[in-house]
Amino acid sequence: MLGRTAQNLFWLSRYIERAENMARMFEVGYRMSLTSRREGSASEHLISMMQAAEVEEGFSRKHKQADVNAVAHYMIFDEENPSSVRSCLLAARTNARSVRTALTIEMWESINAAWLEFAEIRPRDVTGARLQELLGWIKQVSHTYRGALLSTFLRDAGYAFSQIGNFVERADNTARILDMKYYVLLPRATLVGGDVDIQQWTMILRAASAHRSYRHVYHDRYKAWNIADYLILRPEMPRSLGFCVSWINRTIDMLEEIYGARTAGHDAADAVTELLEGTTVDRIFEYGLHEFLTEFINRNNRMTDALAESYNFY
């Protein structure tokens, strides 16, 4: 497979997943802001969300105040924000057009239809209940594309690059969602363990579509240790770091079988795996949750760079 085709398929999956993830991150920041009036400014939760998503600097250059409308527009519609939902859907469609013959009809139609529908939305009309509906629609777009990919795509190198892109992006987002909790509680240690703390952890689970499944696994109230364990280490939770890394390794091994060679990308994936293997949630909190997540994100990024170099993305 040509490096350019591999690159487009990898980033196509990343952009579709990122669009969903931006919707998830904004939703949890938005919900936190609605429950924060008792202990401080609602905007701090929106700011912490943007810090975790690494878009706060760009936002602050354009806006003086982080109110819901301004943040929603920047996260969803702003053309100058490279991680906005609009930017992600457009980039996904552009990548899809570049490799249209490598995609199935169902994959292309799901992306093209999503972009055409999104392009018709007027940002000024998206407020209140319509904002919540839009966030749900964005997540559904991602699920539709994933369903088309898993149901119709030939299990070859293109499939492997698509899967790696998806799970690299998903792992990055889960780490950032968890890290957002660190940013929220960092200046307010007195809130840890209180009702507000529990509400925020609950919203973190909702952002990862893990609210109900958590109860099936732990049969317990929401506890920081259990939630961190669930979203970092549990191999059966499809948005956990452990689950994502397992799928990355599985599909990188596919590439080794297809091309008959091990690359620097494999070594970089091993470095990500080593961070998770043999550890426990107690050790993670002892080390520092924020520090652990930062190291994971850094290793995940280095793996992307190694894959790009190994398979001639550039």
Image (tube, rainbow, N blue to C red):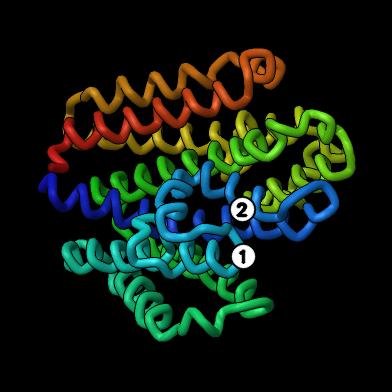
Horizontal relation, residue 14 to residue 130: left or right:
left
Is residue 68 positioned above or below 252 on the image?
below
- Residue 150: horizontal and vertical position, in percent? 42, 58
Horizontal relation, residue 34 to residue 81: left or right:
right
Is residue 68 positioned above or below 160 on the image?
below
- Name the quarter where the C terminus is drawn: top left
The residue singled out by tag 2 in the image is 46
Identity, as a three-letter code, of the amino acid under mark 1: Val
As drawn, the label of residue 24 is none
Q: Residue at the spot x=36%, y=42% of the render? A: 164
State the residue in front, 93 or 235.
93
Q: CA distance from mark 2 to mark 1?
A: 8 Å
Q: Is residue 39 visible?
A: yes
Q: Is residue 152 visible?
A: no
Q: Residue at the spot x=24%, y=46% of the render? A: 157
Proximity of marks 2 and 1: CB atoms separated by less than 8 Å: yes
The residue singled out by tag 1 in the image is 68
Q: Secondary structure at mark 1?
A: helix
Mark before the other along the chain sequence, 2 or 1: 2
Q: Residues within 10 Å of mark 1 (few under 14, many from 20)?
A: some
Q: Residues within 10 Å of mark 2 (few under 14, many from 20)?
A: many
Horizontal relation, residue 240 to residue 244: left or right:
right
Identity, as a three-letter code, of the amino acid under mark 2: Leu
